[in-house]
Amino acid sequence: MGFRIILLGPPGSGKGTQAEKLNDDLGLIRLSTGDMLREAVRDQTELGKMAKQYMDKGALVPDDVVIGLIEEKILHIKEGFVLDGFPRTVQQADALRKFADIEHVINLDVDDEELVSRLTKRRSCPDCNVVFHLIYKPPMKDGVCDKCGAALYQRSDDTEETVRARLKVYRDNTFPLIEYYGKQGILVNIDGKGNINEIYEAIEASL
Ligand code: AP5
């Protein structure tokens, strides 16, 4: 079994970007609760209809729902994995301990103004979930995913108003996990500002 990693950090800190690199480079399975929920919203499943009401406001989807989603996936994984966007509350972290043994928690640290600027200029692929940035990581062809050729879109929760609401939700609910994992001795803080490849090298060096 490979590494079992959590990527922690506020919205826009680069969790998805770095999780994709860990997947490409080390073959770790990327488990993103955000991507799973957006897929359910697109497919208009019962889960998707319920989750959309929370996601549109930048609020968290109820703990029991996301815990169920992740547990179901992790139990079938034989390789290593990287969790992107889970856990987000102490209740989720407590539940995770019962079904997975996490080795590394990487906390990406980025200030709020940079986060707002990153998210309002983000473009995402609906098919393979790769993310781009209009300035820092533009696609080779305007509006088209480099990896799979699908048309890129802007997430409905990437408006400035909703981003600021998500940052507050992060501070109130997810920030306490830094201390939670710090006490367990498995947390590494990494400066999430700067060159994407250099941040990845710092993550790799910490494993
Ligand atoms: P989710 O999809 O998980 O969103 P998030 O945590 O807000 O994180 P983001 O995807 O916005 O950012 P990221 O850190 O992955 O950054 P990225 O790499 O894309 O969740 C969405 C919603 O789903 C939640 O609001 C909630 O409603 C629900 N949900 C999900 N999980 C849940 C859970 N566990 N419990 C309850 N509810 C849940 O990068 C951002 C941009 O910056 C990109 O454009 C990228 O190209 C660019 N970028 C990345 N790195 C750099 C860099 N170093 N320099 C410059 N630009 C960079």
Image: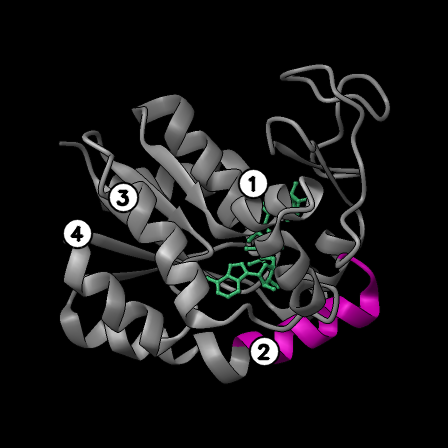
Q: Earlier in the sequence, mark 3 or mark 4?
A: 3
Report helix, strand or loop for mark 2.
helix
Label 2, residues with CA under 10 Å away: few <14, some 14-19, many ≥20: some
Q: Which residue is mark 4?
A: 103
Report helix, strand or loop for mark 4.
loop
Q: In the image, which residues are magenta?
A: 158-170
Residue 195, numbered label: 1
Q: Is residue 74 above or below residue 20?
A: below
Q: Which of the two residues, 56 or 148, is positioned nearer the viewer here? A: 56
**Mark 4 or mark 1, whichever is nearer to me:** 4
Q: Amino acid at mark 4?
A: Glu
Q: Mark 2 near ligand 1 (CB under 8 Å)?
A: yes
Q: Is residue 163 magenta?
A: yes
Q: Is residue 158 above or below residue 61?
A: above
Residue 97 figure quarter: bottom left
Q: Are marks 4 and 2 in contact (CB under 8 Å)?
A: no
Residue 169, numbered label: 2
